[in-house]
Amino acid sequence: MTTRRAVLAGAAVVGVGAVAAGVGINHALQEKAGPPSPPATDKAGNMVWRNWSGNQHSYPAERAAPANEIELAALLASAPAPIRAVGAGHSFTALVPTDGTLLTLDRMTGLVGHDAAALTAEVRAGTRLGELGASLAAIGQEMPNLPDINKQTLAGAIATATHGTGHGLTAIHGKLLDLTLLTAQGVPLTLSRDQQPELFDAARVNLGAFGIVTRMTLQNVPLTRVKKTVTMVDADRLMADWPRLRTAHRNAEFYLIPFTGRGILITHDVTTDPVKPRGEDHDDEGVMQLRQARDLLGWSPWLRRKVLSGAVADAPPDIAVDAGWKLLSNERGVPFNEMEYHLPLDAQIDALREVMTAIETRRPDVFFPIEARIIAPDDAMLSPFYQRESGSIAVHAWFKDDYSFLFELIEPILRKHGGRPHWGKLNSLGAADFRKLYPRFDDAAKLRAELDPQGRLLNPYLRKVFGV
């Protein structure tokens, strides 16, 4: 999912069109209708809520947007359960759906204060990552890393262990110094490594099940200029060279484009070069052009590979130079559903090869590139990176396509290699599975039950996660 994708796909579709004409394919592409939309209201008149991709929805009886902790505390004590907080609605799992109370912190945003010498900033939990980048830049700070998408709220990002990529760089929750958590009874708790450290380790990746985080202090770094380079590379060579690449750059990630034999390497490195702003993003256009190539040539994987690989063979690198917060995240306007697992780093490439083979031999409908990143270990109880440097693999499906293959074909591969799923992305696991994957899962579950003995913050999905 890079700007390079538009370049390669644009050229590819020209080639596809020529090939299609040569073999007599002249029918118009048929646009899929996609899954049907749920009714706008339920029988009780409650309005529908849907997530970004449209694969989750519910009809909350009440919706609330408290302006401060006093209002939030009163709401938590009296609102109909389950009480679920929503940020950007970018999770594909059923973390948010509720027929009780849907809570947003959109009125609890912005910087509270900062320490210029210590490079720390206190931030309200409803702040969107994209807005936070500009606010921190104004005080000479930036977050050490950012995820691919920056529309999430800060609270939602830490709740699901949202991450970027880079050797020695943790997920966002790894740079938390302290946080304020309001329990299901509305009791405020200030947590840090010095104040109730066990709860702090549980609440840093909390799934919205331990309470509602209202503010947190981030350990930041000085505002830094970086050089972003996007390069087309042979897929096999890219995977073979990944152990070197992932440590040779401050940030490194790559995408493998199915049915092309090609990959896209994206790196970010600190630089003093003059600013060269990123151009307009064409990622969404590129994704849809790859879909057109799929629709025209999905019947012939050999021909599809020949046309697409030839179109991108000589694509030049894309280079941008700017502040890191402006380059690390991207616009994602084409909805998709996603499964991402975090594997022991040494298992990442073997698993990725299996995933690519499975897709290219059994799923000609897949056209989204497959993403690989690297994340440093941390010690949050429910962190997928708990005490383990991890390599992630993310597989996407267009929101109008059936994504059941993620569970049937992809997930068994990722689980076989010891993967832990991203909390906000598709998986089929329950409490028994998580207990095997997380050494401190039972400790976290016990603390959750102590904080919310009545389960007021648990929707059906979270009851499955915690075995309640």
Image (spheres, grey):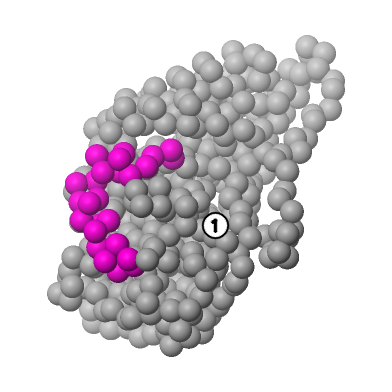
Under tag 1, what secondary structure?
A: loop
Please give the residue where the numbered disc 1 appears in the rendered image: 97
Which sits in the foreground, 253 or 451? 451
Does the segment drawn in magenta span residue 449?
yes
Could you tell whether 425 is left or right of 466 in the image?
right
Q: How many marks?
A: 1
Which sits in the foreground, 146 or 384? 384
Residue drawn at the location 64% of the way across and 34% of the way down: 401
* Residue 351 horizontal/vertical position (percent): 35, 27
* Residue 439 horizontal/vertical position (percent): 19, 46
Residue drawn at the location 43% of the way across and 88% of the way down: 70
Which sits in the foreground, 395 or 270? 395
The range drawn in magenta is: 427-453
Residue drawn at the location 30% of the way across and 62% of the way down: 448
Task: Assign the magenta stretch its main secondary structure.
Answer: helix
Q: Is residue 151 visible?
A: no
